[in-house]
Amino acid sequence: MNDDFRNMNPLMLDTTLMNQKAKPVIVALDFANAETTLDFVRQLDPDLCQLKIGKELFTATGRYLVEQLVLQGYRIFLDLKYHDIPNTVASACKVAADMGVWMVDMHASGGRRMMEAAAEAVSNCSQPPLLIAVTVLTSMTQNELAEIGINSSIDETVIRLAELTRQSGLDGVVCSAQEATLLRGQLGQDFLLVTPGIRLQNSITDDQRRIMTPKAALAAGSSYLVMGRPVTQSQNPIELLQQINNGLI
């Protein structure tokens, strides 16, 4: 990161903003380019949500979009699901921290050494990002797990990988809302549970199988809710976010 960006970066400067409790919704920016993304984000408010940048958008825009959104005051979840040798993942996490990213994820199946290396790499950063791990993708079924040689149930696999994540020094895991209650009981109140597959009551299922509404997911123990189309296709995303934050839907 160059000095000019570091000096302009409000999240790097304002530790109060980084430390205050975030709102539960992480809006998945499932767009193809920076222009469309920035047009949509103008309809939002960084006090009401966080933003998620995934593989497609990051591949298209690189760090430019991350830095633009950080400068606007948004907490950014960089959802690239790292899965590589420990040194490579550790280096990638340090770069993400330098960009001012708020949260980074990786696959728990990369193992203890990979996750520990990532945690160690960001531990000395002035504002280390939250590190979370993916256990079982929310789109996967029991049969699909068996096809890759995992014969334990989805719940058993999620618990085993979540416990490994906690032992490795990470902050939380990605899990379905149905798994949140189970994990909350196993791993305590401070362990973050980030839940995709959140839909409004009248929404279609789309890609993800294990889904739940915002109100139900928070009641089940989820810390953060990843929502894409229900927010990005809403006619009034601000009103929708306010309703979710107030526990109305």
Image (cartoon, grey):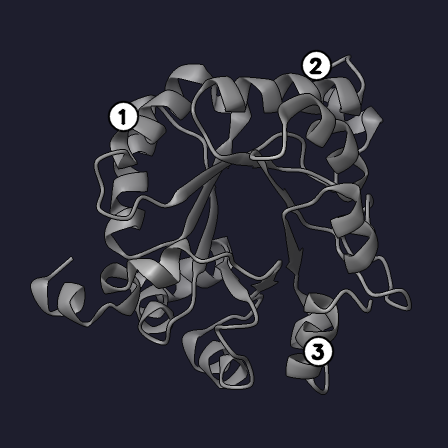
Q: What residue does disc 2 label?
A: 149
Is residue 96 shown above or below 233?
above
Quadrant position of the C terminus in the picture:
bottom right
Residue 115 in view, yes or no: yes
The one nearer the camera, 72 or 203, is 72
Q: Which class describes the residues within 10 Å of circle 2: few (<14), some (14-19), or many (20+)? A: few
Q: Is residue 139 left or right of residue 102?
A: right
Q: Earlier in the sequence, mark 2 or mark 3?
A: 2
The one nearer the camera, 202 or 72, is 72
The residue positioned 83% from the left and 52% from the top of the image is 216
- Amino acid type, callout 2: Gly
Q: What residue does disc 3 label?
A: 233
**Residue 40: horizontal and vertical position, in percent?**
54, 82
Q: Is residue 114 left or right of residue 171?
A: left
The one nearer the camera, 11 or 27, is 11
- The quadrant in which residue 162 appears is top right
Label 3 SS: loop
Q: Earlier in the sequence, mark 2 or mark 1?
A: 1
- Amino acid type, callout 1: Asn
Report, in whole angstroms, how far the alpha carbon at label 1 lies from the one at label 3: 39 Å
